[in-house]
Amino acid sequence: MRAPLALGEPAPPFSLPAADGAVRTLGSFEEPLLLVVFTSTVCPVAVAYEGRLAHLARAHAGRLAIAAIDPRLGDEEPAARRAAVLAKELPFPYLWDDTQAVARAYGAACTPDPFLFDAGRRLVYAGRIDDAWKDETKVARRDLAAAIEAALAGRPIDLDVRPATGCAIRWRDG
């Protein structure tokens, strides 16, 4: 497994099937910022952040695209996974990385694990979403939101970056 992407590195390309039946590639996203977030339908931390990610997508529509990528081992039938995701009506595509090749290319470690890229698709932020996954009312630091605001304003992202936390990705090869 590779180390996580370093700041300034380009986004690794991908071509993955989405819950809506379409195939999305890195080039499918034209917005100035792209958030690639490795997530899961069964990780309680990732599920807790879905609403916050949806809020970011809506608040920055046209300026921020989100690609949610699920690298977990498929314990359920594909149709059940697809139906569960579509029922949530998320405002961003939810992609399946069943081979885990994309998660490995990005160096993802857990779900959720966000990677924010600028218009040139260079990494500008990788770290936690905020400081209180269990209870959004207790959030004191919205790290990802601050990084998005800085990137949209053309300012450097000047944060004491904390690593993403969540459910460890269970890799196919153990």
Image (cartoon, helix red, strand yellow):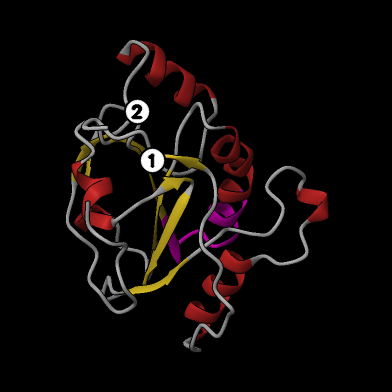
Q: Name the residue at 45% across, 52% down.
A: 113
Q: Residue at horizontal 31%, vertical 15%?
A: 78
**Residue under circle 2?**
19
Residue at horizontal 37 percent and vertical 12 percent from the top:
76
User: Which region shows up in magenta?
Assistant: 55-65
Q: Secondary structure at mark 2?
A: loop
Q: Nearer the viewer, residue 165 or 33?
A: 165
Query: Label 2 to label 1, Cα distance in Å?
Result: 7 Å
**Mark 2 residue crowding within 10 angstroms, few (<14) / some (14–19) / many (20+):** some
- Label 1 packing within 10 angstroms: few (<14), some (14-19), many (20+): many
Label located before the other in sequence (2 or 1): 2
Are the residues at dot 2 and dot 1 in contact (C-beta closer than 8 Å)? yes
What's under tag 2, amino acid-wise?
Answer: Ala
Can you identify the residue that label 1 sits on? Answer: 93
Please check the rendered image and state whether residue 61 is part of the magenta-colored stretch, yes or no: yes
Residue that protrudes farthest toward the right in the picture: 137
Q: Which residue corresponds to the image point at 63% horizontal and 39% vertical from the top-left?
A: 48
| Image position, residue 103 (x, y; %) | 28, 47
Q: Is residue 79 above or below residue 111?
A: above
